[in-house]
Image (cartoon, helix red, strand yellow):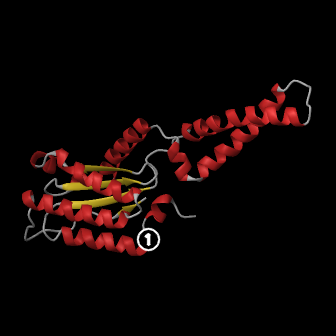
Amino acid sequence: MHTLAEKFLSPDERQRITHCVQQAEKQTSGEIVPMVVSASHDYPLAPVTGAALVALPTAVLLTRLIGDTFWVDFNRMWLFITGFCVVFLLCQQIIKRFPALLRLFLSQRQAEEEVRRAATMAFFTEQLYKTKADNGILLYISVLEQRVWVLGDRGINEKIDRQRWQEIVSLVTDGVKTGHQCEAICAAIARIGEILEQEFPIEADDKNELHNLIVR
């Protein structure tokens, strides 16, 4: 079974993005690493919250309908409890199974924080800090949350204002939400290359030090 990240980009789109990275890096010594992950956190409370929000009014409605229709005279609390448990468990599994539904019940503040934390962790686990000129840059895309984070190494941060990467974040985020993720990622990579070229032009002995695309 394919993960969200694997379904996010087709094999042809992955090749296209890899080619875009190679082209961008012909103009700069900076190392551009786009990374696509299925999710930055498992969000265990999201399906519970969503299921509870659906199950509570549904159980109340079912209790009244069943009680009135079949003239149930015994304590209707048992009808409510049974209905709530059945609907809750069913909804919980459905929400877990469909990312679009799970996304509805995510805390936006938590999602932002988890993506930031996961991007920072990925920067180090993928060793972007080990480039010769400290000029690796991570374009981190978390599919479930539909969020993007750009993280540059210290060499980049010393010369380029971090606010400049906001246009990259907006570009990719808009593309993801409209279903044009490949085009948006390629455009973002080209733009990152243009920005890096101003401070980190290509060098004669330049080597490719990092992956051109990571899909987790």
**Is residue 27 shown left or right of residue 119?**
left
Question: Do we see residue 212 in this rendering?
Answer: no
Q: Quadrant of residue 55?
A: top right
Counting the numbered discs, the total is 1
Depth order, front residue of 169/25: 169
* Residue at 40% over, 56% down: 177
The image position of residue 157, as x and y in percent, is 15, 46
Q: Name the residue under label 1.
A: 10
The image position of residue 96, as x and y in percent, is 60, 48
The image position of residue 92, as x and y in percent, is 64, 43
Q: Quadrant of residue 185?
A: bottom left
Question: Do we see residue 21 in this rendering?
Answer: yes
* Residue at 61% over, 37% down: 48
**Is residue 170 shown left or right of residue 49?**
left
Depth order, front residue of 38/179: 179
Q: Is residue 28 above or below residue 115?
A: below
Q: In which quarter of the image is residue 133?
A: bottom left
Toward the top, the furthest residue is 75
* Residue at 34% over, 48% down: 119
Q: Report the quarter where the C terminus lies.
A: bottom left
The image position of residue 68, as x and y in percent, is 86, 32
**Is residue 17 shown left or right of residue 159?**
right
Question: Which three-letter amino acid code belongs to the residue tagged 1?
Answer: Ser
At mark 1, the secondary structure is: loop
Classify mark 1: residues with Cα within 10 Å, few (<14), some (14-19) or many (20+).
Answer: few
Q: Report the quarter where the N terminus lies.
A: bottom right
Toward the front, the furthest residue is 68
* Residue at 15% over, 71% down: 26
